[in-house]
Amino acid sequence: MSSEAKSKSGSKPRIAVFKFASCDGCQLSLLDAEDELLSVAEQVEIAYFPEASRTMLKGPYDIGFVEGSITTHSDAQRIQEVRRQCKTLITLGACATAGGIQALRNWKDVDEFIRVVYATPQFITTLKLSTPIAEHVPVDFELRGCPINKLQLVELIAATLAGRKPNIPAHSVCIECKRKGNICIAVTRDTPCMGPVTQAGCGALCPSYDRGCYGCFGPMETANPSSLANHFRYIGQPSAQAVRAFRGFNAWAWQFRQASEECERQ
Amino acid sequence: MTGRTIQVDQLARVEGEGSLYIKMAGDRVADVKLKIYEPPRFFEAFLRGRHYSEVPDLTARICGICPIAYQMSAVHALERGMNVHPEPAIRQLRRLFYCGEWIESHTLHIYMLHAPDFVECADVIALARDHRDLVERALHLKKIGNHIVTVLGGREIHPISAAVGGFYKIPTKAQLSELVPDLEWALQASLETLHWTRTLEFPNFEQDYEFVALRHPEEYPLNEGRLISNRGLDIDAAEYEDHFTELHVKHSNALHSVVRGRGSYLVGPLARFNLNFDRLPAIAQDAALAVHLKPPVRNPFRSIGVRAVELVFACNEALRIIREYEPPAVPKCEVSSRAGVGHAITEAPRGILYHRYAFSEQGLILTAKIVPPTSQNLKRMEDDLREYAAQLVAWPQEEATWKCEQAVRNYDPCISCATHFLTLHIERAFE
C-alpha cells in the first residue's frame, strides 16, 4: 500500500467506489459481503458509492475502488481526476485490471466498425481500445477476478485500513486445485484447462465442477502461456480454439495477449 | 410562465450509469430524458465467431446483478436452435437456480435500493442505524438466495456451472437438502417483508400500462411460456421481433423498445404478477391479498410489494423443488452441433430477457441479438416521469427531485444491462 489509509485527523477513512465500463458485479461483491458489510461500514465513511447511496460527497478520499475499463474519451479524463482525489487507488476485477471482456474489440478496427455499422454514428463515442486503469494512472493494488472474490475484497479492505500488505496469493489455480484434492482434469481427461497459467483466487472452481478453468482471474505472475499453448496442440485442440481460450475475460493482459497472437499466427 | 428543471446528474441506487432531466413549463412537463451514458460494450459484436459453449459464460458478463438470467436465456435459445431437450430434472434445477437469483436480486432491490426512498434515508447503511433488524433480515435473505446460486453454480456472481444441455456438475440430494432450514426461514422472512411493505406510503399514481410477461400453462413463469400481454399479445419467442421494435434516441446509449403500432410497455414484477396471479402458489396469493395487492396493480410505486410477493413465491418454489428433487441421469445431455437459429425468452428479475442466436455447423455464433428488460422498460419509465412530474409542480425542488428518482427506481433499472444492446445496429448491417 502506498499510504496508510486512516486520515490524519483521526476521523474514519473516506471510501469511494467508481464505475467505468463494466457489469457492476465487482462493486456488487461489496454488497454481497453480507456478513461483513455492516461492520466494514462502521469503520469507514462511505463518501461516494452511487450504486448503493444517494449521498455523493466530494473528494479527496482515502481509498478509491475502481471497477471497469476505460473505453471513452470522457472516462479517460475522469480517471485522471479520480486518481487525483484518491490517496490509495485499488482496481477491482478483470475490467479494471485487464480491460475486461469488452477488450475483445481491441483486435477489430472499431472506427470502421462504427462507420459501417451505425445509422447515426455521431451518437456513439467510444475509443478504439478497452484498456485497464493502470495504462492511464498509477494503481496501488489490483484485485483480480471476473468477478473478484468477495473474501479477498474483505481481506484487502481490512489490510488497507490497517496499513499492512494484503494476503492475496499470486500462485496458479493449479496449486488451489491440488490443495482441494481434485484429480487433474487436464492430465487425466485431456480437458483444455487454463489453470496452469491463471492466478489463484476463485478456489479452483471450474475444475471442481468438472470443467476446465477459463482464466477469469487472469495470468499469474510467472505464467508460461506458450508452453500451455503447446500442450493444447498436443491434446489436439485446433489453434482457433486456443486463441479463444486466451481471449476471454483477461484477453488484453499482456501474457494472454501474446499467447493468443502467437496461436493465431500458427 | 415560469419554468423549472429537475436534474439528477448521476442516478443513485441503480445498476449502471444514467442521469435524469425533466423540463417543466409552468404546470406542463415540456421534456423528459432518462439519459444513459454508460459506455457500450459491444457484446453482440464479439459473440460472433465464438463457440456456442462459451455463450452462457460470455453473456453472463453483461450483468453482475442477474448473470443467471443471461445464462438461462442463452442456453434455452441455443438448445431450441439445436433441438436439444434436457431431461425434466435439469429443468427443475434451472428453476431452482433462477429462484436463487430472484431472491438475491429482489432482496437487494427491496431493501438496499428501493426501501431507503420510502423511509427517506440515503442508503441501506443509514437505514441500518434506525432499523438494524430490518437490514439484518435483508442481508440474511440475500445471503440465502446467493447460497442457492453458489451450491448450483460455484459462486454467486458469474456462476460457472450452466451449460448448453444442462449443467457441468449437478448437486446431490444431500447438498440441496442442507438448504431447507435456511429456506424455511427465508419463506417466513419473505412473508414478513411483504407484511412490512404495508407500512409504506405510496403516492396516488396509476397508469394504464401494457403489461408483457411470459405465461406458462401451470407455473409462475421463469424459463418457459408464451409471451402475452393484457392487450391481446400471445406469441412464441421466435415471433418476438415481429411484434417489438427499437428506437435509437440521441440521449441514450440504450435503445428504446416499443410494441409495434402501440408504444411503450412494462415488463417485470408488476407485469408478471398481473398476468400470472392465478399461477402463484396459494401462500403467495393469500399473502398478497392480505396486504391488498390484487391484480391489476397499476401503481408502479407498489412494485416493492409485488417484488416481496415474488420473494415468497421464489422461496416456496425453491423448497418445493428441493423436496421433490431426484438427480438427473446425466448432468449434461449430448449436444450435436448443427447450423440453425434459436430464440428464447426468460423472466429475469427485472422482466423478460430475449436472446436470439444464429450459428454455423461448427457451432460458431454467426449473429446474436439480446434485448434486456431495462431497455424494454426505458420508454415506459420516461412516460411515467412525464405523468408523474406534472403532479409535483407545487413541490419544493429537492423533494420533487427525490420523488422523480424514486419513480425511476420503481423499475429497478439495470443500466449496465441495457447499454450493450446498442450493437443491434452492427448486426443488422451484416444480415
Image (cartoon, helix red, strand yellow):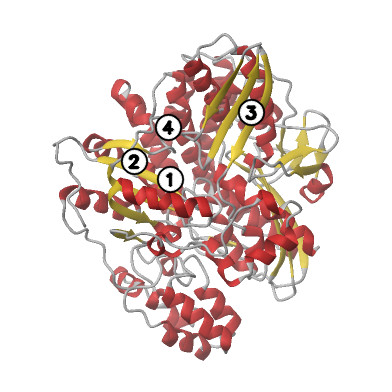
Name the mark nearer the viewer: 4 or 2.
4
Name the kind of residue labelled 4 in the image.
Met
User: Real-space Cα distance between discs 1 and 2?
Assistant: 10 Å
Q: Chain of mark 3?
A: B
The residue wearing badge 2 is A34
Residue A44 lies, in percent from the top left, at 24, 38
Q: Determine the residue positioned at 46% across, 19% down.
A: B118
In the rendered structure, which amino acid carries the disc numbered 3? Leu
- Residue B196 spot, x, y in % from top left: 45, 19
In this rendered view, identify the residue nearer to me: B354 or B88: B354
Establish if A183 lies above or below B187.
Answer: below
Q: Do circles 4 and 2 both sit on a common chain?
A: no
Q: Secondary structure at mark 1?
A: helix
Q: Which mark is residue B270?
A: 3
**Few, some or many residues within 10 Å of mark 4 (<14, 14–19, 20+):** many
* Chain identifier of the residue bearing label 4 in the image: B
Question: Residue at image x 46%, y 40%?
Answer: B104
Badge nearest the viewer, 1 or 2: 2
**SS state under label 4:** helix
Tell me the kind of residue under disc 2. Glu
* Chain of residue at mark 1: B
Please say whether residue B277 is visible from this viewpoint.
no
Can the viewer see residue B113? yes
* Residues tagged 1 and 2 counted as in contact (Cβ below 8 A): yes
Q: Is residue A203 left or right of residue B416?
A: left
B207 up-or-down from B236: above or below: above
Q: Which residue is mark 1?
A: B146
**Depth check, front residue: A2 or B222:** A2
